[in-house]
Image (cartoon, rainbow, N blue to C red):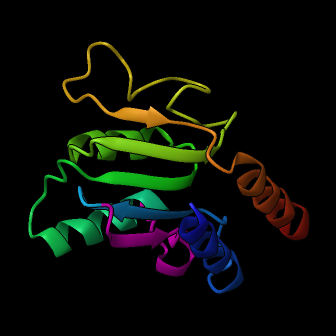
Amino acid sequence: MEIALAAAEIAWREHGDVPVGAVILNSRGEIIANGVNKRELDRDPTAHAEVVAIREAGRVLNNCRLDGCTLVVTLEPCAMCAGAIMQARISRLAFGAWDEKAGAVGSVMDVIRDPRALTKVEVISGVLADRSSALLKEFFTATR
C-alpha cells in the first residue's frame, strides 16, 4: 500500500488527477504492474488507476487472466473497476479508503461479493485507510 500511496501522489502532483494509485502483485508477491489515475492526462474516463494497472499486468504476463494476482489500491473501486477486477480474474483485492459516493465493494454497492458473481475475489478493506483518506481530502481541498 505504501507504493500505491506514492503512485497516488504522482496522479495528483504530476497529472492533476484524483490521487488514486494501484499496484498488482503476482502470486509470489512481486510487483508486476502499477497504475495511477490518468483520466485528465489521457482524456480517458476509463483510465482509473486499477484499469491502468490491470492493462499493464496483462501485458507483463501476456495474458488477460490475472489468476493468483493481488490488486492493491488506495481507494475502494467503483463499479467499472470492480467489473474489470472480476473480468481479469484477480484473486485478491486490498484497498485503503472507502468511497461513500461511488464505492462498489461495500460502500454504495458490492459488485465483487455479489453471490451471483462468477468470479470470487478475496477482499481486504481499510489498509492504511487514514492515509488514503487524508490524501484525498487534501486534494479536494486544494483543487475544489
Q: In the rendered view, does 4 fall on the left or right side of 85?
A: right
Q: Position of residue 76 (x, y in %)?
A: 56, 43
Q: Is residue 40 magenta?
A: yes
Q: In the rendered view, does 74 fall on the left or right side of 35?
A: right
Q: Residue at x 36, y 33 (%)?
A: 122
Q: Residue at x 27, y 39 (%)?
A: 86
Q: Position of residue 102 (x, y in %)?
A: 60, 37
Quarter holding residue 56: bottom left
Above or below: residue 52 compared with residue 72: below
- The residue at the far front in this view is 28
- Location of the N terminus by quadrant is bottom right
- Location of the C terminus by quadrant is bottom right
Q: Nearer the viewer, residue 127 or 61?
A: 127
- The residue at the far bottom in this view is 14
Above or below: residue 58 compared with residue 115: below
Tag count: 0
- Can residue 128 be seen here? yes
Q: Residue at x 68, y 78 (%)?
A: 16
Quarter holding residue 54: bottom left
Q: Residue at x 26, y 53 (%)?
A: 69
- Can residue 45 be seen here? no
Q: Position of residue 137 (x, y in %)?
A: 84, 56
| Magenta range | 29-47
Q: Position of residue 104 (x, y in %)?
A: 50, 32
Above or below: residue 39 compared with residue 122: below
Q: In the rendered view, does 1 fall on the left or right side of 111?
A: right
